[in-house]
Image (cartoon, rainbow, N blue to C red):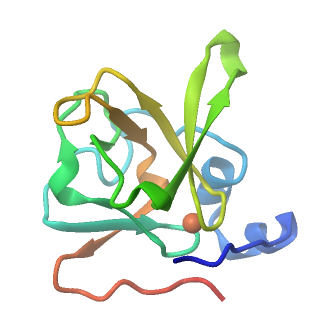
């Protein structure tokens, strides 16, 4: 449903804030309890901050206590891509936007039912869109 978005490193740098670029393109992690969405409870959807693709529904968001916004499922299976991440002497599963490849966070298997998964995401990789608003397509 979504065409891939491919930009050069310089193009991403120009279209993102330095903080967004660090997380989305360099796989950084925002400090816990520092982001806009870990304690955010409005109803709506979370889109990719880099390309605007809808990624997670607020109805699957839950309080993980980690200081990062946490969800038990993506809005559609195809919205995200998952791959093994061996950095920092750990084996984790990285979660990226399937459309632009932007780094979102990681998924762990200690989440709540119905999936048992915890998508632990960076607020800065996301934009919130209220249920009755139209998401802005930021891809150009
Ligand atoms: Fe994206």
Q: Quarter containing ligand 1?
A: bottom right
- The residue sitting at 64% across, 78% down in the picture is 3
Which residue shows up at 41% across the image and 68% down it? 47
Q: Left or right: where does residue 30 sit relative to residue 42?
A: right
Residue 59 in the figure: left or right of residue 137: left
Question: Measured along the vertical axis of the image, is residue 57 above or below residue 28?
Answer: below
The residue positioned 36% from the left and 53% from the top of the image is 74
Q: Is residue 27 above or below residue 88?
A: below
Residue drawn at the location 19% of the way across and 29% of the way down: 112
Q: Quadrant of residue 67?
A: top left
Q: Position of residue 100 (x, y in %)?
A: 65, 66
Expressed as whole percent of the image width and height from the top left, the position of residue 123 reads 41, 51
Which residue is nearer to you in this view: 138 or 94? 94
Total marks drawn? 0
Q: Nearer the viewer, residue 15 or 95?
A: 95
Residue furthest to the top: 89
**Is residue 18 shown left or right of residue 128?**
right
Residue 36 in which image quadrant: bottom left
The picture places residue 48, in percent across and down from the top left corner, at 48, 66
Which quarter shows the C terminus?
bottom right
Residue 76: x and y in percent read 37, 60
């Amino acid at each position: 449903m979504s065409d891939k978005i491919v930009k050069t490193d310089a193009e991403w740098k120009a279209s993102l804030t330095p903080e967004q670029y660090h997380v989305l393109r360099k796989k950084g992690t925002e400090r816990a309890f520092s982001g806009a969405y870990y304690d955010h409870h409005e109803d709506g959807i979370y889109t990719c901050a880099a390309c605007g693709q809808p990624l997670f529904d607020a109805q699957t968001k839950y309080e993980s206590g980690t200081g990062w916004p946490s969800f038990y499922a993506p809005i559609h299976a195809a919205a995200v891509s998952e791959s093994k991440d061996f950095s920092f002497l750990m084996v984790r599963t990285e979660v990226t936007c399937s459309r632009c490849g932007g780094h979102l966070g990681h998924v762990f298997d200690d989440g709540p039912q119905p999936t048992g998964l915890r998508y632990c995401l960076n607020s800065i990789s996301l934009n919130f869109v209220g249920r009755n608003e139209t998401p802005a397509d930021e891809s150009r």
